[in-house]
Amino acid sequence: KKMPGGRTLRACRVQTLVLCVSSVHSLTCSLVRSPAHTVTAPCRARPPVRAARPMLVAAQDPAAMDTERGFEHWWDDADEEVVDRQLSVQGTIPPWLRGRLLRNGPGRWRAPDGSRTYLHAFDGLAKLASFHIDDGRVTFSTQFLRTQFYANTVSTGRLPPSITTGPVQPAWSRKEQVAASLTATGFDNTPVNIHRMGGSGAWVAVTDAPPLVSFDPVTLQASGRLDLRQTPITGRSRLLGGLLPSPGYELFSTAHPQRHTATGETLNYHLELRALGGGLAHIAAAKAVQGDDGRMWLERRLVGSLPLSTIASDSYYPYVHSIAVSKHFVVLPLYPLQIPLGKIANGQGFLRQLEWRPDQGTTLAVWDLRHALPLNSTSLGPPPVLFTAPAAWGYHTIGCFEESAPDGTTTLTLDVNAYSSPDITNGPHGYAYLPNMRDAQLRAKQELDGGFLRYTLPGLSPPPGAPPAAPKRAARAQWLPMLDAAGRAWSFELVRISPAAKPGRHRFAYGHTGFNQPQGAGPRVFGPHGALVKMDADAALDGATAGHASRDVSTGAAPGGAP
């Protein structure tokens, strides 16, 4: 759009939306697990690259970075619950911005009686937040998610023994460790993310475990665990030549289910533990439907299954936080970061005890969604095509798209917000460990955000009559530079692409960094200031000159703000 003075306005609506939402949400005490959705026009083809095209734009204002503005208080317990509190608005909200922004995050870490506390953000009691935006006004509501775990905590005044993400202080006793192991399937504290299920569109709060806690997006009231009424996917493998079933149960999933744009189904990873034969990785497609009794039911069918012993050994249990979905394929990244099952209930937290085995490399398991099993099938899902790559680690996938190759096959491109080591997760200066977040000196040592890693997976969907492919193939792994106009490197996390670009080829990715400056630009401060980062993947591939724009995206807590 042409503006006064001959300036051109491009994608300003996207940036304004992100800035507005980021500013409002930074008033809460909850950790933002997923950034605002952005809407941009998809880029279906790659136009010719001009040498001056921006590759990376970081919206931030170094002049505003002179104070941390009480960042340590973001990690305090926030017991207050609010219904429709009117918030003050600085500036003008555009009339087209209407709706409800929903968030999930931890609201309390310390036991009511003060006897024990969690030391990692993702163990806090789940607390939902809603920002209702209408006619230029914003009202705020926040409620704890009323789960059985929450009820037990409040009624006893203590933290119930459970498998934890990070340490508890003091650690569980031997007796409590046993209780934590035995009650794992009853755990329902889900403070990490929210998702709208396929089918009925039921909203659920999720974490890296199987529980799906339904809630009303307007009142924020919980209505129970949707996953307690679902089609089972475990126990389908057989022993002794198929004579006996191999019992198993689900222990881990991911906090980032994916909706398929065509079928509307929710796709996610599920780790099945078996008494013999090691773990099974499943990809399941689910829909929330209403049963004959009027209650909600979760219909699930298997897209594919993979015995994890084919990747490493019977003791290989990878930590997986997200998957990726294209039009016809789903990708399960299996990094060499392993869960030590024998230690997960000891009160030290499974995240800090994850084992890094880089010699094992990364495996990318790819299933064709067109070959998924029908509903109510009792068989294991079909096996995947496996691709190998050098060792890397990533919490979050960015996006996935497919393109036709000259030989009639399909090439799949997978982008990951990746790291060369898992120190952000299990290192001494990893993210979201409360002692690190609350101490300015420790925050100064915070591990950097992730980079942009692109995998190319060729040779999928071979035409009829083509020779059989190798059981494992090599993927091309390419780290794309994230440089601004001055050639300085940036990093980011919680990356999103425009929903309008899915499932086609995407060009831009939008993320957030908690650091106030790029690498090499002087002292870096980790805190509430940070920057919004726009990455142009096509420009990075073609070696274009980078660009940089500046804008203050930070805000401090104010009286009458959102708790």
Image: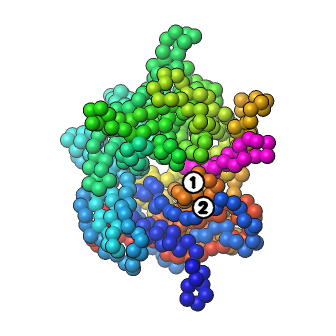
Specify start and end residues of the magenta stretch as a single range.
395-415
Q: Is residue 484 above or below residue 34?
A: below
Asked which secondary structure carries label 2, the reply is loop
Residue contact at pointers 1 and 2, CB within 8 angstroms? yes
Picture disc at residue 502? 1
Rounded to the nearest angstrom, the CA distance separating label 1 from label 2 is 8 Å
Image colouring: rainbow
Q: Is residue 418 above or below residue 35?
A: above
Identify the residue shown where x is 54% and y is 59%.
500
**For residue 461, side relative to residue 212 (left or right):** right
Q: Which residue is mark 2?
A: 42
Residue 239 colored in magenta in the image? no
Q: Amino acid at mark 1?
A: Lys
Q: Between disc 1 and disc 2, whose residue precedes?
A: 2
Observer able to see residue 481? no
Say which quadrant the N terminus sits in.
Answer: bottom right
Asked which secondary structure carries label 1, the reply is loop
**For residue 293, side relative to residue 244 (left or right):** left
Q: Amino acid at mark 2?
A: Pro
Q: Position of residue 398 (x, y in %)?
A: 58, 53
